Image (cartoon, helix red, strand yellow):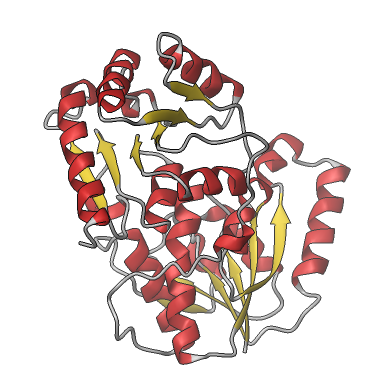
Amino acid sequence: MRALIIKLTSMGDLMHALPALTDASKTYPDIQFDWIVDENFSAVPSWHPKVSEIITTNHRTWRKQLLSSSLRRELNELKTKINARKYDVVIDMQNNLKSAVLSYFVKKEVHGMNKNSAREYPAHWAYAFKHEVPKNLHAVARQRSLLAQSLNYKIDDESIDYKVDKNIFEAPDFTLPDKYLVLVHNASWPTKLWPISYWQKFIELINQEGYIAVLPSGSKEEFTRAEEITSSNKKAIALKQLSLNEIAYVIEHSIGCVCSDTGLAHLSAVLDKPSVTMYSITDESLIGTRGKNQEHIISNDARMESITPEEVLKKLLKSVKENSDGG
């Protein structure tokens, strides 16, 4: 069986879909997936061994190019790629307006969520097969339910298996410390950012425990922030922008992670690393990290400033100890 998945972004959302592919492969051992994804996150589908071909889009630029000949050419090329192979089933696992547009490009009828379940109205108009997936389920469970209904199987095991091929990860061109923690300091919204002074205090605390802090960055702005956080501490390293496969390698070889509510927090869960993720305004029950060794701290007043470095350290050390003990 060969299936086509449409799921474009974002980093965490893409990772949420991986366990669904693992489920499907248990019922259909020979199944292969092709995946349409934003070019910036194309590494994520490549981690799952059941993904054969990755079709990339640059859809974030489409709005700027409306009515342009270059956009028409790009869309025609994309349509040709999508329909170059015959699929047994096509599933829109994004269920928003952009993914629905791509669903219209597919010559085969598409599965997606119904009007009560889709992320954006009226995305469901693009689907020939519309499935009910409760919105109060966690994002991982929603993806698993949609794929199970689309491929007509039942989920017998509720445990989450991302089934990542870690051999795809790439070692960066520098030497990592022997004993380090990854601090994911960035976030897309200011309300999700832990104050710089809190990060600096936390680094002092982990230094006392024998750990060096490593801070990855996804942009020049994030690197500038990482440099500010690490400026007063010789046992803290601000990393310049790396590829997603390189960051995955860094996290995989760490002792554990402390994360803001952002995409790399979900990567720590995918890799089963002992982690603490901090939440302010996000509904953790719907899109929080899911996997082994995950600890969450939820602000009691929707302010990141209410979460103390000491509280985070206590949670992290607990998770690291339980992991080392085999718990």
From the viewer's perspective, is 172 left or right of 151? right
Of all residues, the one furthest to the left in this rendering is 300
In the image, is residue 42 above or below residue 85? above
- Which of the 4 quarters of the picture holds residue 8? bottom right
Q: Position of residue 30 (x, y in %)?
A: 59, 90
Q: Residue at x 35, y 60 (%)?
A: 139
Q: Quadrant of the C terminus?
A: bottom left
In the image, is residue 196 above or below residue 48? above
Answer yes or no: is residue 116 visible. no
Count of all numbered marks drawn on residues in the image: 0
Q: Position of residue 155 (x, y in %)?
A: 33, 83
- The one of 145 and 211 positioned closer to us in this rendering: 211
From the viewer's perspective, is 222 left or right of 161? right
Of all residues, the one furthest to the top in this rendering is 232
In the image, is residue 24 above or below residue 243? below
Q: Residue at x 42, y 31 (%)?
A: 187
From the viewer's perspective, is 205 left or right of 269? left
Q: Residue at x 23, y 40 (%)?
A: 316
